[in-house]
Image: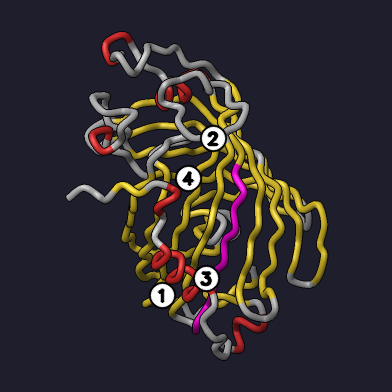
């Protein structure tokens, strides 16, 4: 079944209410390990999340997407799977600088459900992998800091029968993070920008002669600025086993290198998401992050 298409102006109030409820639940007592800053070396469980997301950068339509995955957290000195990334390898870490290789992904889009892309190939799942330099610019309090992230990632697409390279993306991000805002939840507010190679721009914005119509002119995409993102994420531990997360995001595509593409439809797009993590098994060995 195809997910329903929802425009920005029609974003259901009920969905926003659920997001607020997830982020404003009463605080529950925290285990002593959490207070000490220690966490299990590894955790296994389930992660389920969903959200209302744009079909692609500068799309005019949003769809509800959801995903359930096995949850793995591993807090080793080199191999890491934690809140900074589903899977990453940490090559260097000091008090102010960290260098790792990280992964990132995004949902597919059915072109048949998108008015601008109808008749064109679907957009597959996208994956990204590459180095990321993280610099702590300031530590405002015991649990707060300001960080600059500088990731450079190769991009690939897949329908799980084959893989195709889609160029690369550079996505610097400035973020304020607080581990226990008002002694309630983890909080991250970030502002970032994305710059893509020509091959990545072609994937989102190119229209070949084959797919040109009376209302969709042929277009040759070019590399450059894609857009900027303002994002708020909150992560609420309920106890040692259950955690909730929720996020709101706004993407600004003013001045994009491909504003003239007929597939470029909206200068500002919004997204909202929420979910939970259930940690079913945990190691007895504890480590300090």
Of tags 3 and 2, which is closer to the observer?
Answer: 2
Q: Which mark is residue 253?
A: none
Left or right, 53 with reference to 66: right
From the image, which quarter does the C terminus lie in?
bottom right
User: First in sequence: mark 1 or mark 2?
Assistant: 2
Circles 1 and 2 in contact, beta carbons < 8 Å: no
Say which residue label 4 marks: 104
Q: Secondary structure at mark 1?
A: strand
User: First in sequence: mark 3 or mark 2?
Assistant: 3
Q: CA distance from mark 1 to mark 3?
A: 12 Å
Say which residue label 1 marks: 279
48 versus 231 height, above or below: below
User: First in sequence: mark 2 or mark 4?
Assistant: 4
Left or right, 158 with reference to 56: left
Q: Which mark is residue 41?
A: 3
Q: CA distance from mark 4 to mark 1?
A: 22 Å
Circles 3 and 2 in contact, beta carbons < 8 Å: no
Circles 1 and 3 in contact, beta carbons < 8 Å: no
Q: CA distance from mark 3 to mark 2?
A: 43 Å
Tell me what residue is drawn at x 33 percent, y 40 percent. 108
Q: CA distance from mark 2 to mark 4?
A: 24 Å
Tell me what residue is drawn at x 40 percent, y 65 percent. 15
Q: CA distance from mark 1 to mark 2?
A: 39 Å
Say which residue label 2 marks: 267
Tell me what residue is drawn at x 47 percent, y 65 percent. 73
Of tags 2 and 4, which is closer to the observer?
Answer: 2
Residue range in magenta is: 229-239
């Amino acid at each position: 079944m195809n997910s329903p298409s929802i425009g920005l102006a029609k974003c259901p109030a009920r969905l926003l209410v659920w997001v607020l409820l997830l982020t404003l639940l009463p605080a529950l007592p925290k285990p002593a390990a959490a207070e000490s800053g220690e966490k299990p070396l590894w955790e296994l469980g389930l992660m389920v999340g969903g959200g209302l997301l744009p079909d692609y950068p500068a799309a005019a339509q949003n769809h509800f997407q959801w995903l359930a995955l096995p949850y793995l957290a591993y807090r080793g000195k080199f191999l890491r799977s934690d809140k900074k990334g589903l899977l990453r390898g940490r090559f260097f870490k000091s008090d102010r600088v960290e260098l790792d290789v990280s992964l990132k992904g995004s949902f597919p889009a059915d072109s048949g459900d998108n008015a601008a892309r109808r008749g064109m190939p679907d957009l597959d799942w996208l994956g990204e992998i590459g180095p990321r330099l993280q610099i702590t610019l300031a530590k405002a309090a015991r649990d707060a800091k300001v960080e600059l992230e500088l990731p450079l990632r190769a991009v690939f697409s897949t329908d799980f029968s084959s893989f195709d390279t889609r160029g690369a993306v550079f996505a610097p991000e400035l973020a304020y993070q607080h581990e226990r805002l008002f002694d309630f939840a983890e909080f991250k507010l970030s502002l970032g920008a994305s710059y893509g190679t020509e091959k990545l721009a072609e994937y989102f914005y190119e229209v070949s002669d084959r797919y040109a119509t009376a209302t969709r002119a042929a277009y040759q995409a070019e590399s450059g600025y894609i857009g900027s993102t303002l994002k708020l994420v909150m992560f609420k531990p309920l106890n040692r086993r259950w955690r909730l997360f929720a996020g709101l995001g706004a993407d600004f595509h003013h001045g994009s290198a491909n504003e003239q593409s007929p597939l470029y439809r909206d200068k500002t797009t919004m997204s909202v998401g929420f979910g939970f993590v259930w940690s079913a098994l945990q190691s007895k060995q504890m480590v300090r992050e």
